[in-house]
Image (cartoon, coloured by chain):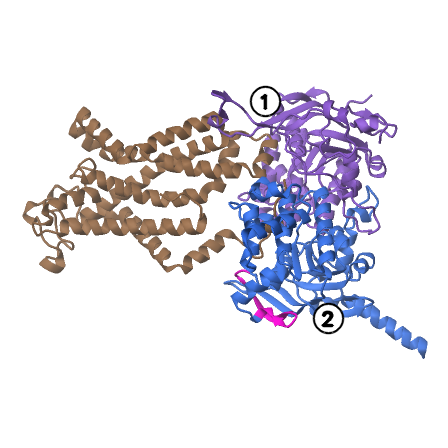
Amino acid sequence: MKYNKKDLTHPISGDRWNHIWSGFIGDKLAVLALLIFLFYCAISLLAPLLAPFDIDDPAFMDLMNSEIAPSWISHDYRFLLGTDAQGRDLLSVILYGTRLSLTIGICAVLIQATLGICIGLIAGYLGGRIDNFLMRCADIQLSFSNMMVAIVFLAIFQSLFGIAMYQQLAMVILILVIGLTEWPLFARTVRASVLAEKQQEYVDAARVMGISSKRIMFRHILPNTLSPILVIFTVQIANAIVAEAALSFLGLGMPSTEPSLGSLIAEGMAYMFAGSWWICVIPSVTLIILILAMNLLGDWLRDHLNPKVYKD
Amino acid sequence: MNLLSVTNLHVNFHTKAQELAALIDVSFTLNRGERIAIVGESGAGKSVLGFSIVNLIGKPGYIHSGSIRLENDELTKMNLRQLQEVRGKRIAMIFQDPMMTLNPVITIGAQLVETIRSHTKISYKDARNIAIEKLNHVQIASPERRFDQYPHELSGGMRQRVIIAAVLLLNPDIIIADEPTTALDVTIQAEILQLLLAICRDNGVALVLISHDLGVVSKVAERTLVMYAGRIVEEGPTLEIINDPQHPYTQGLLNALPQMTLPGQRLNQIQGSMPSLIERPSGCAFHPRCPYAKEKCKKEQPSFIHSGVSSVACFLVEDMINEFANQDQEVSK
Amino acid sequence: MTIPLIQINGLEKTFTTHEGWLGQWHFHQGKLTRRKDSVHALNGINLTINKGETLCIVGETGCGKSTLARTIMGLTSPDSGEIRYLDQRIDHLNNQQRMPFRRRMQMVFQNPYASLNPRMTVYQTLSEPISFHNPKLSQSQIDEKVEVLLESVGISASSSDHYPHEFSGGQRQRISLARALSVDPDFIVADEPLSALDVSVQAQVLNLMMDKQEERNLSYLFITHDLAVVEHFATRVAVMYLGRICELAPRSALFNHPKHPYTRALLSAIPRLDSNTTQAIRLIGEVPTPIEKPIGCVFQARCPYANQRCYDQSPEMITQSDESSVACHAIEEGRL
């Protein structure tokens, strides 16, 4: 086997990550997206400190205060962004909602990633029948619409265990449902890069040393497939948050006692044309900005880390 | 008059951080029908030079200054259309990987015919006949059958022959061959080299052979340029360079060949490796690896001086020549 | 008689070309049949490697020399035949059973840019096999061993925290060699370790390999297509063509008196510096792909001396007077 010497030598070799980082700093849009994402993370972490009202306090819900417009319209400075139909301070609810949405998004993607990476590594590294079997499973999983699986599962759960039980476990169940339905995306990407990495001689070198398959997969190959994983990770968080919002909007997600951004939007819809537009619009804008930032970040990473990665 | 003359050519790579010089002050000439070789290790800039001649150097590289004249035409000042005319008809290129030139989804026959018909107005049938004749010329067995095959159906050696046939179609004045046989096996390499040599001799085509293999060069080229870190360090007749290298780098390169030492003995190695563009040493770029390096070599770039039939850029040789000249003077006194 | 270090008997390996199970079905004359196209990479290789010697395997692309290396190292399993290490069979062992032999046999790869894990520092690359095969060593002992190893291949120990991309090709190939040496093997398979390197750097690596051989009494199986390196480095040379060995000879015998027609063509084709060498012997055609298992001599299609017997019958290795052995009917019959 011979290969091109020119492929191997690059006139400007340097630290790849330094190079990427300096490129990142130069791209204002990417920096803005990252700042927005960090800002969201910060406000979700600090929600209990930042929120002007404690949402667990029974006095928090006061129908007397329902449907107050945002402060710049109503000049009621107790509620900066106004209140919803149940008289809750919209700012506090949105802060907690963002916290919930992000938690569900990140946890769900962590499940997806763990499952997908393990399956992808095993399929790609071992190959043969195992690979065929796992990838057909992924195909079957992908051929069902994720939303459909989620709806069916959530509906069955609600009717089996009752709404009360569901409301208690809503968050865990949402994380599991969203996490378990989208692993094939990770699995396929990881498998593709594993197949490419497996051809590299350092894998053979490790095998010649007698190092176990498990160690080769996780210690040698996995670190070299991280960049596409990182790209999908960012984009998938956005997708998971949207999925959660959509399910909540359809009434299958978070209950209104523990509202996520999706359920806030769903609730607000009813008042949209009754004049209280803010109950719907403000959470929507919050959600849109978050999703936009995540997608911009993902796009930038894809372009700069691995131009060939699978685009969802 | 020289067919091709390159004078004081500087090629730079433009990067965000800095300007990197890939070629520095490169000058050489090529006569009609002459075969020259450009030798150097990877990173020496020999391919950059090959590409620069036809102004094919891609971003971030660009020709910073200097001139490349093809007879009376200045190539550095040409627009794209004129350049394309030159590239096809007067200067042809052969690459290490034939697939860089061949389109994988078109039969080789169709590619050859298209090349002919884009430059001369003749019927398909005539073009086909010419193409088959040329395939025959490059010793491809049963050219009629090969005519309808796709590049992937041919072996590496066969593809390189097709490329040579395609080059011949346009009767160029110069062929630039960039490592044309590096990817091939020895037996095939020998055949391709013979073919290339025969074609240049028979048609009076000038050849610029870019190679890292001194053995290959000695078989084909009449004159050799040795490059190191973007500069030409030695230039002269191939036999002279091989039998009596002047520059310490050329000497090192030749002495490092396994056949230069008795079997089983340690080889004469050059310490270190070619510097990258970023960390080019000051003065003579070879000084960190040179066994004869002096203080002067670290500071100043030696200029080209004639030494016998060769030209060398080295202070060691320069000093030696000066010494001889002094001795001569003393003797004559 | 001493036991050879490595002994290979009748090694065969076939690769199937169709990747998928579905692709193997063909509809032919009204019948659905399953057909596997296969490439016969190794067709009965017999070799011995003695202690302390360098056996070079020479051949062109596709002759199966890399497959041979990978089979010996257990990276692919042979279809039939046996491989013995000091008279113990090792070709059918599983990973666990092979472990003691892994320490004794190591490999250096062709591409210095791919054979080191880009995400592992030099220290990690070298310390992993050391700690893996010597679980009793303490951290400081491992550190010391890595340091000694690095210095012994001419890489300064202070650069052990650097990543592979910070080194040049030659340096990486030294690190590769250091990794192979880290488990103190006595046999190293080197698969074209010089072909990606520049001439001046090739000399450095080759010198290093010779030094290590002297120091540690290593045996090498050195795979290359560069005959100049072979002439310099080999104790014995095996010339391979289409999965068979056609000539096996001590170095001087091979280079002074090549016997097999293929060896002769190969030697005449080296572009040598002295210009008065004889004209290269032209071979007809190119190396065919061994889809069908060859009947008769593997070289018959390109051999200028081929007769009917060469098409029908596979030649046996016959030992000649100068310790070389050749598989060729023409030589056996005295036609050549």
Q: Nearer the viewer, residue A84 or B90?
A: B90
What predominant SS class does the magenta segment belong to?
strand
| Bounds of the magenta segment | B58-76
Confirm or deny contact between disc 1 and disc 2 (CB under 8 A).
Answer: no
- Quadrant for the N terminus of chain B in the image: bottom right
Q: Amino acid at mark 2?
A: Ser
Q: Amino acid at mark 1?
A: Asn
Q: Nearer the viewer, residue C219 or C103?
A: C219
Q: Colour of chain A?
A: brown
Q: Nearer the viewer, residue B56 or A150?
A: B56
Name the subunit of mark 2. Answer: B
Q: Residue at x 48, y 26 (%)?
A: C21
Q: Secondary structure at mark 1?
A: loop
Q: Residues within 10 Å of mark 2 (few under 14, many from 20)?
A: few
Q: Colour of chain B?
A: blue
Residue B90: image quadrant is bottom right
Q: Is residue C33 above or below residue A208?
A: above
Q: Secondary structure at mark 2?
A: loop
